Image (cartoon, rainbow, N blue to C red):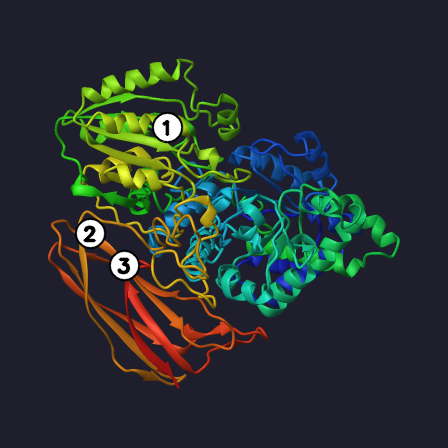
Amino acid sequence: MKIQIKTIFSSIALSALLVGCNSKPTSEMDAFIDDLMGKMTLEEKIGQLNLPVTGEIVTGQAKSSDVAQQISEGKVGGLFNLKGADRIREMQELAVNNSRLGIPLLFGMDVIHGYETVFPIPLALSCSWNMETIEKTARMAAIEASEGGICWTFSPMVDISRDPRWGRVAEGSGEDPYLGGEIARAMVRGYQGDLTRNDEILACVKHFALYGASEAGRDYNTVDMSRIRMYNEYFEPYKAAVEEGAGSVMASFNEIDGIPATGNKWLLTEVLRNQWGFDGFVVTDYTGIYEMIAHGMGDMAEVSKLALEAGVDMDMVSDGFVGTLAQSVAEGKVSEATIDQACRRMLEAKYKLGLFENPYKYCEERKEAPAYSLQERKDFARKAATESFVLLKNEGNLLPLKKQGSVAVIGPLGNTKANMPGTWSVATIMDSAVTVVEGLQRVLGDQVTVRYAKGSNLMSDAAYEQRATMFGRELGRDNRSDEALLNEALQVARQSDVIIATLGEASEMSGECSSRTELNIPDVQRRLLEKLLATGKPVVLVLFAGRPMTLTWEAEHVPAILNAWFGGTETGLALADVLFGDANPSGKLTMTFPKNVGQIPIYYAHKNTGRPLIGPWFEKFKSNYIDIDNEPLYPFGYGLSYTNFSYDNFTLDKAEMGVNDVINAQVTITNTGKYDGAEIVQLYIRDMVGSVTRPVKELKGFQKIFLKAGESRTVNFEINADMLKFYNSDLDFVCEPGDFEVMIGANSRDVESLPFVLK
């Protein structure tokens, strides 16, 4: 059905409108938008740059009644975090029928790792190292969100971070720029497709840029680094997402070179548009323009001008553009041509989404069956969760557990639905989440007796627990004493053959504004764990976390540790699959686990320094600590399986290559254990001599392979000159002749190496 926009367009624009939006050449889109903009007042153009929040999911400055009035006046370009196709249609009808020109709205939402069906948090998903799985989760999320009227998601979050104190590491893909870039591409493909269908939605790459490097791991804090580090270590995932065709980019809160990203023209125009060729639109983060006042960049009129001229096209919530730009134009401080440019980008996005052809494209009842049924989405969420879990320790092959006898699930995270989906699962239905206890009972039936005791509250400090479980994710604090909870748990433990300790963080202890200075399991839970170990029963620690944690004590004392992160709505079923051997864990870490917070930032691709520590022990006048060694607890790329893999016959087909040549690296992987399983084979390269200092190793390739017990496979990596390139001190992207080292292994620490030369 074609929708008649109220304005009478020129014949060429109307023709372009009725033919359909997404397959037309750019000239037809330009003609349509030229005609429309010729009818727009300055205020209506500025209105297209305004993005208020409904206040339904995130409390904002704009109330629903205020928004409705703004929409009728043509002062709104889009809304976000409004749930439900019927409600979204009401707002769209208001824009189409009540505003002078009837320009449709964009509807966005924080669809970060799923809509109602929630997949593992992004950090967990990244540990699958499976681009097909990651792309498919984004595809399924787009299908569900679009069924609810959403056409734009504020995802993927591609910030590189090497500081697990920062809570938003849960929302990203870890510490490595190459892996982060591959994941960014997969998610953009999954969300957007080619934007021709009503179940494909616009991606928004965030947070541009460098947000993951905030000082002290504190949210919204300052970032300060050299440009050579930006280009070599942090920019790659943003650039990859842009190259994949992401339709929008979100500016970050932090400053860069002393100028907030929201008003940084070098970042938003020179880098993003001129160097990378980005042709979509830029939106601020929540109140990003307003916050530049606190940064000390001027009053609202000044910071709004700064943002617009830097390259921002849409103002999220601040009301800076709609509140000041018309007056700034009247005073000659802002050019209307600059506003026209931003308005055009917003209209282009709506045109490419097909909203001018049919404003209700995402609100109508679907005649065709969705690409994946609800059950298929749930089944895939369960599978994705099993791929995201990382087995950190399995002493004596305690896991997988036998489907017999009895197990005790003990811990504050063992029977709570609200915390399974993880942070930023804003649209999910919490009651649909499967707890650990429920999952075990459903999978095991009457084969295994499952008992449960809470054992402790999340924290002994009730006030701290309240801060750590905001946004309606409370665990239901038990008012009994710590001793009463502990005694009940010990009684249940003694009646059972195996203890599954469900401990760690609550979901809102990670995510936005959830930075921590201590990354250990809270004291009351540690005490519970100690007492459970003292029973002499086998203990499996199932760790819930949105970040790497400091597990030095646990790694020494607990026989089996499975890092479950936050696995989404099907977590309980996925854990039952893995704990009892129906699925073999294959996840590998994408962030380094420190031994203590004093080592942070800690990451595998560090520089060598002029005084590197050669051995594991302390040496005076070398780069080390006097109280702990330099090594992480668990390195990047680490993860165990129920089976074992051997790496043999690592070879290079030649020892030298030119810039137009390739070297083939081969290694034979054999599953030497008793279980079928998947292995993630990782390739690293080191540039031994460069015009600028280079990291000790960098990930340049990986393959995830599945091998049956006893099976062998030869894995091949092709090394070309592009893999050897880096940004030099002039920010030229070059590869330099000289000596290199190629490494292949199961993680960033346990590798074999061979030399080669680039001539």
Percent x, y for residue 734? 50, 77
Q: Which residue is mark 2?
A: 677
Please name which of the two marks, 1 or 3, marks the residue nearer to the observer: 1
Q: Quadrant of residue 329?
A: bottom right
Q: Residues within 10 Å of mark 3 (few under 14, many from 20)?
A: many
Name the residue at the front extreme: 620
Percent x, y for residue 193? 45, 56
Q: Amino acid at mark 2?
A: Gly
Label 1 vs 3, first from the N-terminus: 1
Q: Which residue is mark 1?
A: 525
User: In this rendering, is residue 609 above or below 204?
Assistant: below
Q: Residue at x 23, y 28 (%)?
A: 499
User: In this rendering, is residue 631 above or below 430?
Assistant: below
State the residue in front, 619 or 606. 619
Q: Quadrant of residue 443?
A: top left
Please name which of the two marks, 3 or 2, marks the residue nearer to the observer: 3
Label 1 vs 2, first from the N-terminus: 1
User: In this rendering, is residue 276 above or below 3?
Assistant: below
Q: Amino acid at mark 3?
A: Ala
Q: Residue at x 46, y 80 (%)?
A: 736
- Please tell me whether mark 3 sits on a helix, a strand or a loop: loop
Q: Amino acid at mark 1?
A: Gln
- Please tell me whether mark 1 sits on a helix, a strand or a loop: helix
Percent x, y for residue 586? 26, 50
* Badge 3 vs badge 2, beta-carbon distance below 8 Å: no
Percent x, y for residue 573? 27, 34
